[in-house]
Image (cartoon, helix red, strand yellow):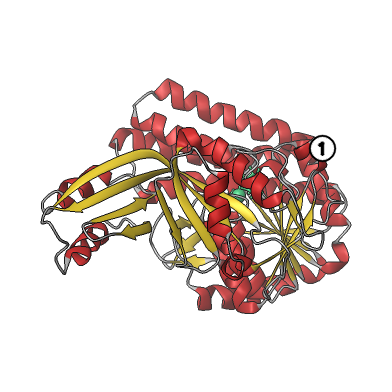
Amino acid sequence: MIVMKFGGTSVESAAAIERVGGIVQSRRTRRPVVVVSAMGKTTNKLLAIAEAAMKGGRAEYIRQIQDLRDFHSREARQVVPLDHRAELDRTLDEHFQELTELVKGLAVLGELTPRSIDAISSYGERLSSYIVTLAFRHFGMAAEHLDSRRVILTDKRHTQAAPNFPETYRRLAATVPGLARDSVVVMGGFIASAEDGVTTTLGRGGSDFTAAIVGAGIGAEEIQIWTDVDGMLTADPTILSGGHRVKTISFAEAAELAYFGAKVLHPATVVPAIEKNIPVLILNSRRPEVPGTRIVSEHVPSGNAVKSIACKRKIALLNIHSTRMLMAHGFLRRIFEVFDRFETPVDMVATSEVSVSLTIDNLQRLDAIAAELRQFAEVDTETDQVIVCLVGENIRYTPGVARRVFGALDGINIRMISQGASLLNLSLVVAEKDLHRAVVALHEEFFTELDPAVFERNEAVHA
Ligand code: ADP
Ligand code: ASP
Ligand code: MG
């Protein structure tokens, strides 16, 4: 068995779903279990509907729900055979009526809880998985829909739920292999349920995580993440177009890149895959012939020190100065207690005798945190900062990386730098306005020469 996960753009339209059908069909003998995201930007739209309901604009959210229904209906009708149209319409009606009732109820209450956010955002994957199942049958494949909420069990941390692995693995192993014997199993990513059956979600981008959980639970030989890029690239394509494809990367490097902002993979994805040593592939559903990126458990030797550059945007930098002349003992503990109390993780830290600089990416409690810290320290906060993170297991074995970074970034104000904590990254903080220039300079410095065993050169970049 293999797990094939298709992201939002890969199922965004009838044409995209047809491409997916072809890709799955050609791998039919490997007994694929398919995990799909919501179609296109559906999750964002569902969240916008919830927001509109909070603002009380009834006409507005009803219109948005109608638009979303029209979109699903229009695309689905093209991939569902005529004799299934009535069933399709009935199911869409049921789902959208339920959704409308739910949203109306929330509008009356005027309060949006994480639990209701999950209830609303679950509709995207519930609909897409159902539509893709019907489409596969239309394309001539035996396909079975499996409601992920029946098998993926989580705690009740709505919008960020954590799986109960033993129970989830038990249910997956009991359900999926039997279904996959004769049919392509289709499941929605992202959605799950708590023990009492209430719908939960695994966090934004969580369908990758679902794929890995399913892969681990059924002992898949491979987990394929099909997306809209050729694989893991040497730079975030939204910042620098034309990065090179990384052919092979280690689990540790991929996890680090994901954590530091490479959206192509959800940060939790590799954990179940590592535990069961299942290779993960990142592939392009628009260009299925490209071999993509293979994520493997072992170290990947490379002539290049760096494998890729990730960026984590919209972070805040806090500079905290001890109000005494010298840092008293217990100062760091007091600082970190504040972040702990506000449940805000700290990403990077640098300390000197009298001051501490650190970054956070969850800015919700920033003001409250700063106020609390000001009780015993001077604090200044700067938003619109970015962590730029060079990742590669070779960084620690290669002398002169820091010198090359400083050389490349000559003239750019580096606000903070950290190397060593994880041994495979070198991270620095720059202002958002310097981001593009910094990434271009670093990319040129570290990827002009490429180890052909590890990278596939994108000729466009140096044209
Ligand atoms: P999906 O909907 O398939 O899950 P995502 O949008 O979540 O797709 O992830 C794919 C996107 O990740 C790409 O379109 C790209 O913009 C972004 N991305 C960020 N960093 C990288 C990187 N280093 N390599 C490839 N893609 C990256
Ligand atoms: N649909 C969800 C999201 O947009 C999950 C995913 O696509 O991975 O976040
Ligand atoms: Mg994604």
Q: Quadrant of residue 103?
A: top left
Residue 169 visible from this viewpoint: yes
Q: Is residue 163 above or below residue 450?
A: below
Front residue of this view, candidates 349 and 72: 349
- For the point 82% across and 49% down, the residue is 21
Q: Is residue 60 above or below residue 291?
A: above
On the rendered structure, is 64 left or right of 264? Answer: left
- For the point 31% across and 33% down, the residue is 108
Q: Position of residue 120 (x, y in %)?
A: 47, 44
Quadrant of image for the C terminus: top right
Front residue of this view, candidates 76 and 312: 312
Q: Position of residue 319 (x, y in %)?
A: 27, 48
On the rendered structure, is 317 left or right of 150? Answer: left
- For the point 43% across and 21% down, the residue is 59
Residue 191 visible from this viewpoint: no
Identify the amino acid type marked 1: Leu
- For the point 74% across and 69% down, the residue is 222
Name the residue beneath numbered marker 1: 82
Q: Position of residue 462 (x, y in %)?
A: 77, 38
Q: Position of residue 314 (x, y in %)?
A: 43, 41
